[in-house]
């Protein structure tokens, strides 16, 4: 069984060594770690080289070039770099708990390997000193974990650093444009073509700090948005439209008619007339994971308040 761990780095010298060492401390040891650096200007590249020189399982795939392509394309290049049975995604600044790989692979064995599969878990949010801020990111932010296409179209609950995909799913990842994030799109592929499976157990410590690309929601972030409602509604619409563009890629795939219908209804929601929008939202059940966000989401789509063509 070939297991690839994929890590994309960018100016991550503060916490990178701890993350690599947490991978080295896994109870499952037969893995290969492939790291792509996205043009770091700090000491990140030197740290990667040091670990690659001392552990044959670690490969620095672009040690000779420093092109910056962004996080989505970085992970795409990593997935396509070397074929494996399973691919784990790793951030540069978290800590993997020792049984993360073993636990996830045990779940993967319960499913047919030729069917597209993503497995993901919960995680604990910690501060820079690894003190626990929240025991469950899923429960604190999303109320529940998504496993179905209808849920995942409107809201992502997969944190990339907890996720694993099999090769059958990796083969379907062929696009990088108009994606909100690689973990969200891969989760959509899993729900559209195979299975998205959630393990209700934390397998990593998610380090919350100022430089996170996408961080856990904090009260300060929420307050900042609510103090500026015009920006809030603009951001809501940006997310709705971006998630529709992302979902549109699925229509190019050979998926079940029922699922294709759900996707088409979602990506065309604001194009229907007033009564049709109400009917589609009611009959298909498009919603967010929390009641308040569902109310805002549906109200904006029904009224098209602050929507700009």
Image (cartoon, rainbow, N blue to C red):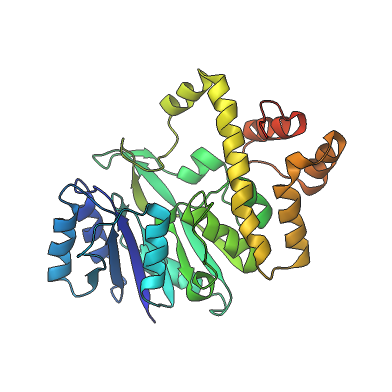
Q: Tell me if I can see residue 250 in this picture.
A: yes
Q: Is residue 33 above or below residue 10?
A: below
Q: Which of the 4 quarters of the picture holds residue 27?
A: bottom left
Residue that sits furthest to the bottom in the current view:
1
Residue 5's spot in the image, x, y percent?
34, 67
- Give 58 or 40, whichever is nearer the viewer: 40
Residue 118's spot in the image, x, y percent?
52, 65
Q: Residue at x 51, y 73 (%)?
A: 171
Please state, as top left, top right, bottom left or bottom right, where the C terminus lies in the image.
Answer: top right
- Give 249 or 300, whichever is nearer the viewer: 249
Residue that sits furthest to the top in the current view:
227
Q: Tell me if I can see residue 25 in this picture.
A: no
On screen, residue 47 versus residue 293, left or right, reads left
Residue that sits furthest to the right in the current view:
275
Residue 37's spot in the image, x, y percent?
27, 57
- Give 307 or 75, whichever is nearer the viewer: 307
Q: Is residue 135 above or below residue 69?
A: above
* Count of residue discs: 0
Q: Residue at x 55, y 62 (%)?
A: 197
Q: Residue at x 74, y 68 (%)?
A: 256
On screen, residue 136 versus residue 29, left or right, reads right
Please state, as top left, top right, bottom left or bottom right, where the N terminus lies in the image.
Answer: bottom left
On screen, residue 33 versus residue 292, left or right, reads left
Residue 9's spot in the image, x, y percent?
28, 54
């Amino acid at each position: 069984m070939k297991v690839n761990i994929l890590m994309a780095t960018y100016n991550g010298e503060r916490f990178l060594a701890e993350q690599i060492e947490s991978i080295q401390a896994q109870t499952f040891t037969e893995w290969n770690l492939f790291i792509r650096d996205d043009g770091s200007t700090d000491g990140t590249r030197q740290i990667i080289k040091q670990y690659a020189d001392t552990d044959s399982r670690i490969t620095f795939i672009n040690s000779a070039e420093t092109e910056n392509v962004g996080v989505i394309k970085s992970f795409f290049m990593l997935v396509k770099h070397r074929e494996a049975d399973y691919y784990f995604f790793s951030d540069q600044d978290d800590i993997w708990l020792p049984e993360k790989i073993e636990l996830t692979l045990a779940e993967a064995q319960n499913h047919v390997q030729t069917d597209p599969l993503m497995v993901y878990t919960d995680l604990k949010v910690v501060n820079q000193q690894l003190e626990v801020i929240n025991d469950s990111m899923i429960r604190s932010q999303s109320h529940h974990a998504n496993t179905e296409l209808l849920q995942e179209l409107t809201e992502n609950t997969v944190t990339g650093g907890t996720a694993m995909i099999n090769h059958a799913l990796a083969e379907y990842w062929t696009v990088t444009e108009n994606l909100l994030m690689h973990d969200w799109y891969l989760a959509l592929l899993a729900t559209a073509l195979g299975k998205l499976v959630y393990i209700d157990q934390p397998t990593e410590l998610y380090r919350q700090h100022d430089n996170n690309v996408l961080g856990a929601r904090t009260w300060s972030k929420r307050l900042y948005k609510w103090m500026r409602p015009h920006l809030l509604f603009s951001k809501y619409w940006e997310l709705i439209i971006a998630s529709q563009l992302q979902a549109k890629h699925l229509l190019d795939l050979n998926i079940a008619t029922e699922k294709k219908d759900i996707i088409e209804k979602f990506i065309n929601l604001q194009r229907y007339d007033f009564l049709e929008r109400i009917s589609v939202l009611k009959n298909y059940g498009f919603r967010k994971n929390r009641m308040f966000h569902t109310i805002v989401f549906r109200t904006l789509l029904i009224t098209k308040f602050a929507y700009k063509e």
